Each structure stands twice: as structure tokens, then as C-alpha cells.
């Protein structure tokens, strides 16, 4: 098949899911990605409690709600406001999924610890491949850390990752916390896109180790220090009752986990003219690059 033909087939496929979503009143073609992933790997089940990180405009909220049914619960987080959905048991919060207070708010709605965390979040792209790949890894590593802090033991984690140099490091890291790691691409995902989905099956209960020597743990730690974010404690397992649209809190603080990250940022290098080589794989250098970019913007 020639290049043009290939593009035509891809375009048709894109239109196919776009049109299907429109016809079935789903908010995005991505709705079908979650349906297809779950049909194959069955990580969300009826009655499950689900957190959806990066949920706007709400396509995954819709598919997750269809899977969990009336007795499950889905809470989403996005930087964008999500138009309310018609279900009692779906809540969307406007906020940054990397912020502690936003995560706490999401947990406060849940009847119990989530069975599944799904994350389709995409960072803003700069067009510089290494930087975009690194930003995506910070976001997905953050999603992994969040999962280890709030998922119930035995729960599942599904995350979109953009492929690149550090991709295998990411799947290794997921394997530290889950019994099984699967990499997959659903039919509804555009063939030409670098996105793949990583599924962590059966959470083993270990808390994310920010002090580990793993390059992505270092990358996340640097990024958290950079943003001044403090990882302190998280309240899990608040019990609540849902009555119609109302959420009534019954009991709080069933289980607490402490995770301290209080070290100071010891970045003494202060390299103003940092140049990143195309093949640079050192996350610490990449994070310095991002820092430089931010400084230049301000
Ligand atoms: C591809 S869209 C998600 C589509 C969604 N799964 C659906 O089916 O409608 C990616 C989303 O990630 C969100 N996002 C990116 N970074 C985020 C962050 N730090 N916190 C919350 N949401 C974020 C963006 O605002 C964007 O809406």
C-alpha cells in the first residue's frame, strides 16, 4: 500500500470512530479505546470504583460508567471543566491531577478505595520530542505514584504513554508495583500516533518509592521539587453514602498513608546554557532543560 493510500485508510478509520461517537452521543472517539481495552483485558468490572485522570471532555467517564453500572462510582479529574454527565455516580473535578489537594478532593467523593485508576492525560506539546516525551513520563509516573497511594491492593492501573527512549524504563517501573504489565494499542487508537496503553494488573500494595535510584523516580522527584509540591499524607477509604445527586460523608480517615518528600532541592549546577543532545537520555538533564525553558518563558 502506498503512502497516500495508507493515509486514506487511517483517515477513514479516524472518521469511523469519530462518527460512531457522535452517533452514540459519546463525548470523544476515545470512548471506544476504553471499551476495546476493557473488552480484551477486563480490568474494570461491574460495581467497581474508578478514578479517571485527565478525563475531559468525558468520553472515558461515559465508557467507565457503562461498565461499572449503577452501583459503581467514577470520579474524574481534568484541568478543563467537564460538562456534567447525567449520572448520579459520576463526578468530574476541575483541577490538576498532580496536586495533592485535588487528589484529596477526588478521594472524598469515593465510597471506598478505587478498584481501578485509568489515565488518558496528555501534556501540552512543545514540539521538542525529548521534552514532550519527558513531560509525558512525568505525568504518567505521577499517575503511577498516585495509584500506589490510593488503589486497593489487587486493583488495576491503565495509562496512556507516548513511546520514546524511556518507555521500557516506565514499564519496568510499573512492574515494581503490579504483578503483571501489558502494553497494548486498541483499534480505535490512530496507527500513526505514538501513544500506547500500559496496563498494570493486580497492585501488590507497595507504596511508590520516590527515593529509589530508578531514573523515572528521580525524574518525578525533581519535578515535584521544582513545582514546590509536597507529598505529605493522603486520606484513604473515606466512607460516604450517595443519595441521588447528593454525596453524604459518613466516616473519614479509615486508613492513612504517609509519604514524605521534604528534602530540599539541591540543584547547585545552575547551568544557564544547557544544551540537550538529541540522543540525551539522562532525565536529570532533561528536567534542567525544562526548567530553562520555563525560566525563558517567564
Ligand atoms: C486526550 S484528553 C482525555 C480524553 C478523555 N479520556 C476522553 O475520553 O474524553 C487528555 C486530557 O488530559 C488533561 N490533562 C493534561 N494534564 C493534566 C493534569 N496535570 N491534570 C489534569 N488533567 C490533565 C487535558 O486537559 C486533556 O483534557
Image (tube, rainbow, N blue to C red):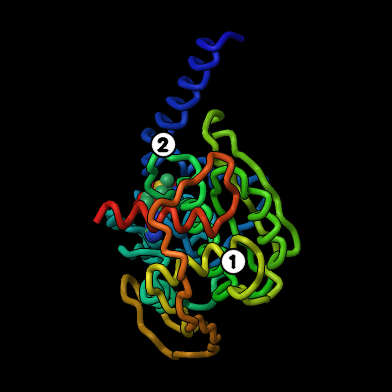
Figure check: 25 above or below 106: above
Residue 59 can be seen in this image: no
Look at the numbered disc 2 and give the secondary structure of its residue.
helix
Instruction: Say if residue 292 shows up in the picture.
Output: yes
| Residue visible at 37% across and 47% down in the picture | 124
Q: In the rendering, which numbered label is found on residue 21?
A: 2
Q: Indicate if the residue with disc 2 has its beta carbon within 8 Å of ligand 1.
A: no
Point out the tag, 2 or 1, that comes first from the N-terminus.
2
For discs 2 and 1, the disc positioned in front in the rendered view: 1
Residue at 55 percent across and 48 percent down: it is: 161
At x 42% / y 81%, what residue is drawn?
A: 241
Mark 1 within 8 Å of ligand 1, using the beta carbon = no
Q: Name the residue under label 1.
A: 217
Mark 2 vs 1: CB contact within 8 A: no
What is the quadrant of the C terminus in the image?
bottom left
44 over 146 or under it: above or below: above
Closer-to-camera residue (265/126): 265
Locate the N terminus by quadrant: top right
Is 121 on the left-hand or right-hand side of 162? left
Residue at mark 2 to residue at mark 1: CA–CA distance: 37 Å
**Residue 93 placement, left or right of 267:** left
Instruction: Please tell me the numbered disc located at residue 104.
Output: none
Residue 166: give x, y in percent of width and height: 62, 49
State the image coordinates of residue 251 (x, y, percent, origin top left).
44, 91
Local packing at callout 1 (Cα closer than 10 Å; few below 14, some 14-19, many 20+) is: many
Q: Look at 29% across and 52% down and name the residue there.
A: 296
Q: Which residue is at the far left?
A: 298
Q: Which of 79 and 128 is in front in this view?
A: 128
Q: Position of residue 19 (x, y in %)?
A: 40, 29
Q: Where is residue 200 in the image (x, y as percent from the top left)?
A: 66, 59
Relative to residue 148, is residue 27 depicted above or below? above
Quadrant of the rendered structure where residue 148 is? bottom right
Amino acid at each position: 500500500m502506498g503512502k497516500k493510500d495508507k493515509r486514506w485508510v487511517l483517515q477513514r478509520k479516524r472518521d469511523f470512530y469519530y462518527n460512531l461517537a457522535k452517533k452514540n452521543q459519546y463525548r470523544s472517539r476515545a470512548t471506544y479505546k476504553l471499551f476495546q481495552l476493557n473488552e480484551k483485558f477486563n480490568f474494570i468490572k461491574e460495581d467497581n470504583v474508578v478514578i479517571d485522570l485527565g478525563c475531559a471532555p468525558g468520553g472515558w467517564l461515559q465508557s467507565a460508567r457503562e461498565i461499572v453500572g449503577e452501583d459503581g462510582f467514577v470520579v474524574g479529574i481534568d484541568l478543563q471543566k467537564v460538562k456534567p454527565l447525567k449520572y448520579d455516580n459520576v463526578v468530574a473535578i476541575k483541577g490538576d491531577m498532580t496536586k495533592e489537594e485535588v487528589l484529596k478532593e477526588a478521594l472524598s467523593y469515593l465510597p471506598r478505595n478505587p478498584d481501578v485508576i485509568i489515565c488518558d492525560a496528555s501534556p501540552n506539546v512543545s514540539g521538542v520530542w525529548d521534552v514532550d516525551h519527558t513531560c509525558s513520563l512525568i505525568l504518567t509516573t505521577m499517575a503511577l505514584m498516585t495509584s500506589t497511594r490510593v488503589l486497593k491492593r489487587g486493583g488495576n492501573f491503565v495509562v496512556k504513554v507516548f513511546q520514546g527512549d524511556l518507555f521500557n524504563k516506565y514499564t519496568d517501573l510499573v512492574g515494581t508495583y503490579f504483578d503483571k504489565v501489558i502494553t497494548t494499542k486498541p483499534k480505535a487508537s490512530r496507527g500513526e500516533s505514538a501513544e500506547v496503553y500500559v496496563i498494570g494488573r493486580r497492585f501488590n500494595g507497595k507504596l511508590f518509592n520516590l527515593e529509589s535510584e530508578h531514573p523515572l523516580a528521580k525524574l518525578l522527584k525533581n519535578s515535584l521539587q521544582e513545582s514546590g509540591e509536597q507529598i505529605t499524607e493522603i486520606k484513604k477509604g473515606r466512607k460516604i453514602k450517595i443519595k441521588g445527586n447528593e454525596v453524604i460523608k459518613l466516616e473519614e480517615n479509615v486508613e492513612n498513608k504517609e509519604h514524605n518528600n521534604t528534602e530540599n532541592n539541591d540543584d547547585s549546577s545552575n547551568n544557564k546554557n544547557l544544551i540537550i543532545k538529541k540522543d540525551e537520555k539522562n532525565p536529570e538533564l532533561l528536567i534542567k532543560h525544562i526548567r530553562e525553558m520555563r525560566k525563558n518563558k517567564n
